[in-house]
Image: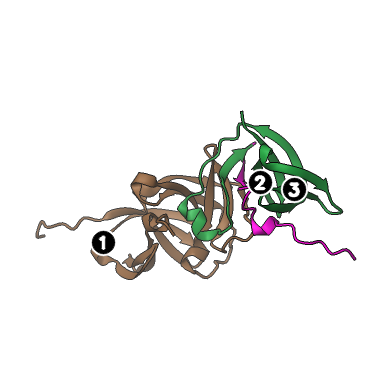
Chain colours: A green, B brown
Amino acid sequence: MSRWLLLDGAGSLWAVGHDAVIAVERRPRGFRVRLGGGDLLVDRVLGVVENLATTAAGPVLKRFWHEPAAGLAVHAARPLVVLDPERPPTILEAREEVDG
Amino acid sequence: MNGAQKSGELHLLVRAGADLCALPVHRIRRIVRELPVSPLPGAAPELRGLAEFGGEPMPVLDLVRLVGAAPGANPTYPLIVVGWAGPDERRELVGFAVDAVLEVANVLAEAIVPAAGGWFRGDVSLGGRAVRVLDPEELGARP
């Protein structure tokens, strides 16, 4: 049985394998999700789902969207992108935060 | 009449902004209204986002952007033509957001003025109207 962490960030829905998540930390704005390939900053952590049916991103999507992804899926009638924990998308990448 | 009737291919004519476009009928699965689309951050302007269709994720393209047309008077793109892109052996469902679906017309291959290549096959004149003919197979070719 596979388990996935559902994330809401940058206006889209994302999922990452639960086993790939090292830590989740609350930040002043949203959450920082630590993965093997880098950290993500997301607005919300929506929960854990099981047995997400994933499909590969096709050539049409890759032609017009160049972020790395492990695949696509649908949860509760909403499409989502399955993240590759070793290559998080740059749009969600957590950079060094500067306070003030 | 010489009996040597030229054959063509049926295409669905759609309005995309100020342009008329033709999509091969055999590549079309369904026409749907008001399909929710989730935008993908960082996507090219041609990609409106992802939608759920038949329980599967499906990219939705903005046909106006795809063909470089001028926006129409009412750019709401209320209809999505769901079709297959790519070669038959690995075709991929894709949605094309359009303003209106007009009619089915026969397009003769020899009447098409070829374009430079890519997913835009060329232009054809149908009933005095300039129509841009799309090639969904090429659209889904490996980028």
Query: Considering only vertical position in the picture, is B96 above or below B74?
Result: above
Give the foreground label among 3 and 2: 3
Coordinates of residue A80 in the picture (x, y in percent): 62, 45
Give the foreground label among 2 and 1: 2
Coordinates of residue A71 in the picture (x, y in percent): 55, 45
The answer to the question of whether label 2 and label 1 lie on touching residues, with beta carbons closer than 8 A, is: no
Of residue B132 and residue A36, the one placed in the foreground of this image is A36
Q: Say yes or no: labels 3 and 1 on the same chain.
A: no
**Image quarter (top left, top right, bottom left or bottom right) of the C terminus of chain B:** bottom left
Q: Which residue is mark 3?
A: A33
What type is the residue that disc 1 sits on? Ala
Which numbered circle lies on residue A26?
A: none
Looking at the rendered structure, the secondary structure element under dot 3 is strand
Find out whether residue A39 is within the magenta segment: no
Of residue A54 and residue B47, the one placed in the foreground of this image is A54
What type is the residue that disc 2 sits on? Trp
Q: Which residue is mark 1?
A: B109
Q: Say yes or no: labels 2 and 1 on the same chain.
A: no
Looking at the rendered structure, the secondary structure element under dot 1 is helix
What type is the residue that disc 3 sits on? Val
Q: Which residue is mark 2?
A: A14
Quadrant position of residue B122 = bottom left
Name the residue rendered at 70%, 57% in the picture. A93
